[in-house]
Structures are given as structure tokens and as C-alpha cells.
Image: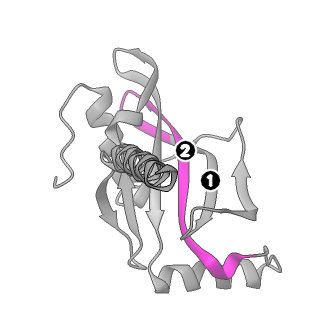
Amino acid sequence: MGVIVMRKIFAAAFLVVMMCATTAFAAWGQIYTDQNDNEIYADPDNVQVTMKSGDEAEFNAKYRMVYAERGRKALIDWYRDNSIVPAGIESLDNDLTTIKFKRDGNKRYYAIVERIYYTASGRAIEGMHFYDPNAKWQEIPIGSVVDVEYYDAILVVDGKKYNPNY
């Protein structure tokens, strides 16, 4: 009798965990595929406005990049070319990046605050974690991945509905 009860408890707990995991990733929508076939995803619910006044705004957003084989190889080659070979880099699957954005009139800027690289199993790859809370502002290049990410986030900041198919 105890084994049956334990199996039911385990099954119920597993179902709850799976529902929570599905909910946690449900809002992520693909917004872009880059030149290396890597897919970039955004979650409009994680855009945080830190300041907004007239034509000025500062806000943060998170993006997830899922690496295609070509993109994964290009990044690994870059690390190797720069004599950096973090343990586990061959298992690279995706990354999670936090970007600060700033709009000042017609000028648009970004600063990458954090980027963490992960394996397919969800383990962070040691030595591939970038964090700079005082990252320097850079102007957003038109037509870049960051331009697409900015446009995606500003829809939320300006109160417009997110549309992953714009």
C-alpha cells in the first residue's frame, strides 16, 4: 500500500514541476534568427522600465539565444582563437543575456550587463559568465541583433502590444 501512495505522490509532484516549468518558458517567443542560424527569444513580461520621461527612457530586458551548430562552432572557435577554452564549452547550447537600453530623443543605446552560457541540460558553463553592472553605453547599430532586441523591448515600454511576427 505504501508503494502505491508513494508513486501517486511522485506522479503528482512531477506533474506540478512540469506545469511550472512550462509556465516559466511559455512567454518566450522567437524574435530573430541571426546570420549563424542562432535563434533569439524574448519574453515581454521581463522588460523592466527603470526611467521614462518624454523622449527619454531606460529599461532592461532579457534575451535567450539558442545556438545552431554553425553559431555554436563560430563562438567556440572565437574562444579558442583568443586562447580561452572554458571547461565544458563543447556542450554549449544557449545563453541568457540581460541588456540595458536607453532612448534619448532619436538616439538609442545599449549595454550588456550579463550573459550566462548554458548546456542543454541547463547547467551554467563555468568560465563563460560575463557580468558588468557598470557596462558602457554603446549606440545601437541599425539592422543589428541588438536593434531587433531594442525594438522588441520598446514595444512594451511604450505600451504597445508585443508581436513576435513584426
Q: What's the residue at 32%, 28% (across, down)?
A: 157
**Residue 109 placed where, x, y %?**
49, 40
Whether residues under marks 2 and 1 lie with C-beta atoms below 8 angstroms apart, the answer is yes
Residue located 50% across and 79% down the image? 71
Residue under numbered circle 1: 115
Q: CA distance from mark 2 to mark 1?
A: 6 Å
Image coordinates of residue 45 in percent, x first then y, are 35, 34
| Magenta stretch in the rendered image | 88-109
> Which residue does the numbered mark 2 point to in the structure image?
98
Q: Nearer the viewer, residue 79 or 123?
A: 123
* Residue at point 44%, 27% (across, down): 48
Secondary structure, mark 1, is strand
Who's the residue at 32% across and 35% down the image?
A: 154
Q: Amino acid at mark 1?
A: Arg
x and y, in percent, of residue 34 in the image: 38, 71
Judged from the image, the secondary structure of the residue bearing numbered disc 2 is: strand
Q: Nearer the viewer, residue 37 or 158?
A: 37
